[in-house]
Image (cartoon, grey):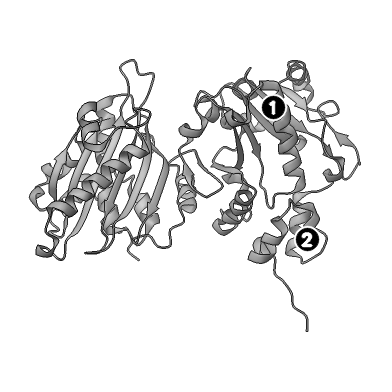
Amino acid sequence: MSEITQFLTPKQKALAINLDHNIYGTFAEIGAGQETVRHFFRAGGASNTIAKAMSAYDKEYSNAIYGTEDNNRFVTQTRLKKMLRHEIGLISERLIKSEMPNRRYFSYANTVTTINYHKTFKGHGWVGLMFQHQPNEAYSEIFLHVRFKENEASLQQETLGNLGVNLIYGAFNYFDNPRSLLKSLYDDISVDKIEIDTIHFEGPAFPYVDNRLMSLQLVKKGMTDAVIFNSEGKNMLPADILYKKDVFAVRGSFRPVTLVNTDMFEKGLKMFLEDTGGKPEDTVVIFEITTFNLRATGRIDERDFLDRVDILAKLGYTVMISNFSEYYRLAEYFTSYDIRYFGIAMGVNNLLMVFEEQYYDHLSGGILEAFGKFFRKDMRVYLYPYMDPETNCLLTSKTLKVDRNLKELYKFFIANRRIVDVEDYDPNVLEIYSRDVLAKITNHESGWEDQLPEGVAEMIKERGLFGYKEFHFE
């Protein structure tokens, strides 16, 4: 496997590509100028690399070249793919490949919108590359979605250009080490300048890449705060599924998911729909796992992560992986997409953690600032009861005790229905605890199967998940 051995600037990378006579392709950039190809022109030797560079900036010309979009939006994944496939088609049509049998061809494209005049919208875009990692090989592709963080259009354009160079250089030099490729995207770019919240690898250059693990890398490396993928394991653009929707979330370790988790979700969601008057098709349900819940042994176990995701996917759930340890950050994230209402199903123990002041020492306003961000007027906590195994007492919002100095504030949230009890719970599942189920699985004890949703126990046994091993006795 190739490794990144030194840090190269965008100019150095562009020159290295230009000096390789066997890398040749096209550039098509919409929305922020021709910022990527500019590096290759300036580096010298560009005629070795650039077959064509264009900017179909005008919408009518863009539509004439690449076709129209159903929603007339230009900064979309669909538009990016149309651009890449169109340009690759022209390479095949116009170039006689037999004359340069060792060439590896590529097409780079981006379609972006930068910060608006009033600076109320930072801008975002799609960036992609189709390339041959070996001569005469089928094309592989990488596409990613970015969100700009800088406050000047010129700075965003410069960052976009650097990112494009990093992508092209990384694809040809680190295709056999996708983690290094991903890391190299931020060479000479601070994570404070741009966020990558979606990435996808596909094709013969990446035969063993699991895009869910690459999504996890985005969160681990601080390239984004959260990633979302559907039950098919496809990385979803958060804005596409969250914007102007009602969001109902369930946070947990789901190691493994139990009947308590599903009862909490189903009963809480039913109440949420009644409270909002929303339709199920307008409501996005998210099963969220924070990276803090992935560190079972002090580090993130990627195999264990995939096991949890696979089980949730089998149940048909959309999964979100985040780096949010505090709940208020989760609420802030969702509301940044202009959602209508936010509901979250939560167990008693988790609510007690919300009321722990020590978790907010880093905020200038302390716990009050956190509460202001979390207990918004358009959100509600659906509190699932907890059967205390030591006292055999049922804990609800009415019997829960918080610190004395927060008691009146707690009563305020109860009175204003920011916290409501899930009353239609199934009493038969209250004494199911994930930690006990996991212990039985790893210790090869019986009796845990009927504490999980239908089909989950079979999946754990078939795939040997969570330390399960089937014993065969002579």
Neighbour class for label 1 at 10 Å: few (<14), some, many (≥20)?
many
Total residue callouts: 2
Residue 333 seen in the figure = yes
Residue 357 sits in which quadrant? top right
Mark nearer the N terminus (2 vs 1): 1
Q: Residue at x 31, y 28 (%)?
A: 113
Taking the image as shown, residue 132 lies to the left or right of residue 244, namely left
Q: Residue at x 30, y 27 (%)?
A: 114
Which mark lies nearer to you, 2 or 1?
Answer: 1
Amino acid type of the residue that numbered disc 1 sits on in the rendered structure: Phe
Q: Residue at x 58, y 53 (%)?
A: 305
Taking the image as shown, residue 60 lies to the left or right of residue 409, namely left
Q: Among all residues in the image, which is located at the extreme right? A: 392
Does residue 62 sit above or below 218 in this rendering?
A: above
Q: Quadrant of the N terminus?
A: bottom left
Residue bearing mark 1: 272
Q: Disc 2 and disc 1: Cα gap in Å? A: 34 Å
Residue 353 seen in the figure = no
Q: Quadrant of the C terminus?
A: bottom right
The image position of residue 98, as x and y in percent, is: 12, 64
Residue at disc 2, secondary structure: helix
The image position of residue 463, as x and y in percent, is: 63, 65
The image position of residue 409, as x and y in percent, is: 73, 18
Q: Which label number is shown at residue 440?
A: 2
Taking the image as shown, residue 16 lies to the left or right of residue 68, namely left
Q: Residue at x 72, y 30 (%)?
A: 270
Amino acid type of the residue that numbered disc 2 sits on in the rendered structure: Lys
Taking the image as shown, residue 96 lies to the left or right of residue 429, namely left
Does residue 73 sit above or below 175 in this rendering?
A: above
